[in-house]
Amino acid sequence: MEGQSDEVFTVSLDELSSIVGVAQEDLVAALKHEDSVDVAGTLVDSNVLAYDELSAFKGFLVGMDQLIVHEAATDTLLSEESSLLVAKPRYGSAKTRLRNAVRAIGRFKVFAKHKVERRHNTCIEKLRPEFTISIPAPKQVVHPLTPRPSRPRTHAFMIPMQSHAASHSQYVLAVEDPWHRRGSGALLRSLSSLTTLPSELSRVTLETVHDATSDEVAVQVVVTKRVPLAGYVLLTSALLTISSLGAALDLQSGVDPFVKLFWRTTASIIGFLPFAGYSIIERGWPSWNRQLVKLFAVCSFSYALFLMTFLWSLNHTSIGHAYIFNNCHSLLIVMGKFLLGSHVLFYEVVGSALGLVGGVVTTLDHTGPNPSDISAAVSPSWQGDVVALIGAIGGVFYLLTAKKLRQEMDVFVFMTLLFVMTALLHIPVFYALNIDIELSLDHHVGWFGWTQPDMLPVELYLVFVCTIVGTVGYISAMKYFDPIVVSVVMLLEPILATAIGVVFGVDTIPGILTWVGGLLVLAGTGLVVMAGSNKIESHDVTDAIHKAPPSPSMYSYKLTKKHKHF
């Protein structure tokens, strides 16, 4: 963008939240930090627009730092902070290193020869207790006697301030904060937020990026994310409950594995419906487009492949091996990142490698069942291992698409639709594999056989524990973690699954190789989770910045700084 020092720009919070991938309310809360100043004010000229709540400004101001890109001389020394901005990556594929050798700050290409100077904003601390700012007027300006529609609160404002450096103006960001208004509406929003997961954003800052040789200005947002306690609780709960899935399914003896999956799917739909219905009433139906439909179709097919191969392998290999091979999607995700030239964190590489080695060590344990100890356990076999590995490919696409879809719709709406599609995909599988199933309540081959007294307790456990706590927990945890983190955590399931299988009498006590491999997987999981717990991202948001109308169509607000009391 190009502009003069006296121009005001609007910042679309809708576009900004879409770029960052977070809710607008969370974005506004993260923009407000210790350097911001709470402000409240009214129109200076009350004859232009009669005062009411809509003509008042309530929010905060925060300074915007500057990044100046110089073509510095060879004898110019970089500060430590500037060096970090243009440091070359130390790891990753050759394609990644080549691409990242040219850094994008805002929308400028920064080469090694460039020097990046950071200038901290000093305007906020110099503001008087009372001051006046001008911001754009609403698009619809109506006569005071005419009822006006509610003014949308979807913009912030970049306001230029006087600066000692005439070449590059400093800006402050004025952000309206409608979520913190007083009244019954705010109270209802607060009560509603109790059912909302906490934000992972700890700090969001907007920075202007200037080219020292031109008037062009770019804007970038720097996002600091930190996983809250709720994220770890979701991930741990999902791990514990999903690990018991195999043992619980084995308790449904005499039932084809695909019928077991169909039972779990249809029963879970019934369990999801109340939550999905409440979400649709509160938030409305998701906005579908062609891209979203394609993502959902890929996700549904991948999830069905992931689960169907897993259940088949449970009847043809040990529980531990079924989990290991079906969950090796972590390795596939890392390999995909390398092949596509995406940035891979060092701990992700090491953690995934440890998890893979641990899985291989575990598969070397071919300790068979002892008939004197147990009669229901299944011995490891290469056929079951291969089928489980095919399912891992579906797991990759499922995790990647689910991460995107959960940002577009409520998790229970997503899970209900996903399970409906999975149930429909069972029909061709039943015919293709000649699986005996009928429309009845028979507890072996009936579509609704899970409602029988001997099957219902296990099915209720599968729905409310393994699915709602486990599967939904993994999807919800993707609010905070990348798919690679969830994928590697899944490698811990064999350790817990084997222990639970022994307790339920459907698996044997593992050998020493399983324990050694499990410890390696545990170490690798810890590294990957640690790598994903704190992240700093930067995005070019210049397209979300729009030139404001000229000054005659602006409102002037007289603002008062709110002093904090400690």
Image (tube, helix red, strand yellow):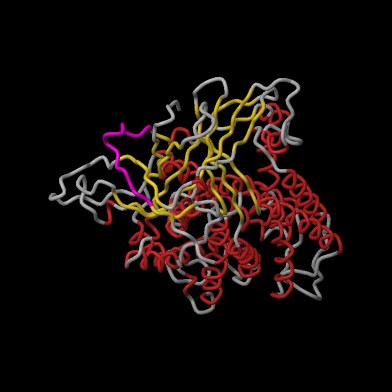
Residue 72 figure quarter: top right
In what quadrant of the picture does the N terminus appear? top left
* Start-end of magenta stretch: 547-559
Name the residue at 41% across, 66% down: 190
Answer whether residue 435 is visible to the viewer in this image.
yes
Work out which residue is located at the far right of the displayed protein and give it: 512
Answer whether residue 326 is visible to the viewer in this image.
no
On the picture, is 336 further left or further right than 459?
Answer: right
Work out which residue is located at the far bottom of the displayed protein and give it: 453
On the picture, is 366 further left or further right than 262?
Answer: right
Residue 213: where, in percent of width, then height?
Answer: 56, 20
- Is 491 or 559 nearer to us in this picture? 559
Residue 478: where, in percent of width, then height?
Answer: 57, 54
Residue 133: where, in percent of width, then height?
Answer: 37, 43
- Is 306 or 230 nearer to us in this picture? 230
Please determine whether, in this image, residue 62 is positioned above or below residue 96.
below
In what quadrant of the picture does the C terminus appear? bottom right
Residue 500: where, in percent of width, then height?
Answer: 70, 71
- Is 298 or 210 nearer to us in this picture? 210
Please determine whether, in this image, residue 284 is positioned above or below residue 163.
below
